[in-house]
Amino acid sequence: MSGHSKWSNIKHKKEKSDAKKAKIFTKLGREITVVVKAGGPDPEVNGKLKDVIAKARSNNMPNDNIERCIKKASGELGADNYEEITYEGYGPSGVAVIVETLTDNRNRTAGDVRHYFDKFGGNLGQTGCVSFMFDEKGVIIIANEEGELDEDTVMMDALDAGAEDFNPQEDCFEILCDPASFAAVRDALEEKGYMFASAEVEKIPQTTVTLTDEKDIQMMGKLIDMLEDNDDVQNVYHNWDEA
């Protein structure tokens, strides 16, 4: 099958190698707060909470931390209120960028995001200006760094579970599925004993942009780093082919 979404693996490898765990846990805590407030504290009833818990565990977030976040969000410990806001814009040379945030201060977050775009050669656009260039897909990454998993077996298990696409990479397998079937595919693979490096619904660019100017490359890298380092920013999606 086609290996058309290699940028997801690049992103996940980077996160695993140099992301600060405390910052990841803070962002996951906010995400848990939002989904618990919207759908309740029981993951068997609240499918979105079940998804976030799986995401938290794939990032090695301790169960005690997860339970504490759920209790806080359900009112047992007193919870903060966060608002979901998505920003869209362009990086250097027209790279499309989507920034998903959870914030308790929309003015602060908007100011920060706009500042990053302005500082690093981009510009913030109107809602909808680039989102049409992306498709939502369930993305499941199964690590295979030691080569212990058989590619054909994993592929058949993924397809039997309802996956749309299977992309073998150098040290992992990337599995894509429709967002509506994401939870079912993830659960079926989990039941077969697979461990996930990552499992979440992401925005996948339909086409990618290659930067050739060294300054643009540096500026785009700095823009992504600054956005991802901001506590209010949950996800950054773009169509820059970093390879």
Image (cartoon, helix red, strand yellow):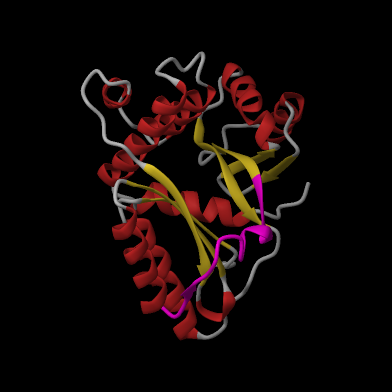
- Position in image of residue 156 (x %, y %): 75, 29
Residue at position x 35%, y 31% in the image: 33
Residue 122 located within the stretch drawn in magenta: yes
**Residue 155: quadrant of the picture:** top right
Give the total number of marks visible in the rendering.
0
Q: Nearer the viewer, residue 80 or 202?
A: 80
**163 to 40, vertically: above or below:** below
- Position in image of residue 95 (x %, y %): 57, 72
- Residue 190 in sight in this render: yes
Residue at position x 52%, y 69% in the image: 125
The residue furthest right is 1
**144 to 117, vertically: above or below:** above
Horizontal side of residue 179 vs 193, given as left or right: right
- Position in image of residue 220 (x %, y %): 46, 73
Q: Nearer the viewer, residue 209 or 31?
A: 31
Horizontal side of residue 129 vs 58, given as left or right: right
The residue furthest left is 77
Residue 82 located within the stretch drawn in magenta: no
**3 to 115, vertically: above or below:** above
Q: Nearer the viewer, residue 162 or 145?
A: 162
Residue at position x 31%, y 26% in the image: 73
- Position in image of residue 235 (x %, y %): 45, 51
Horizontal side of residue 51 vs 134, given as left or right: left
**50 to 168, vertically: above or below:** above
**Residue 147: quadrant of the picture:** top right
Residue at position x 45%, y 85% in the image: 215
**Residue 52: quadrant of the picture:** top left
Provide the residue span drawn in magenta.
Answer: 120-136
| Quarter that holds the C terminus | bottom right
- Residue 143 in sight in this render: no
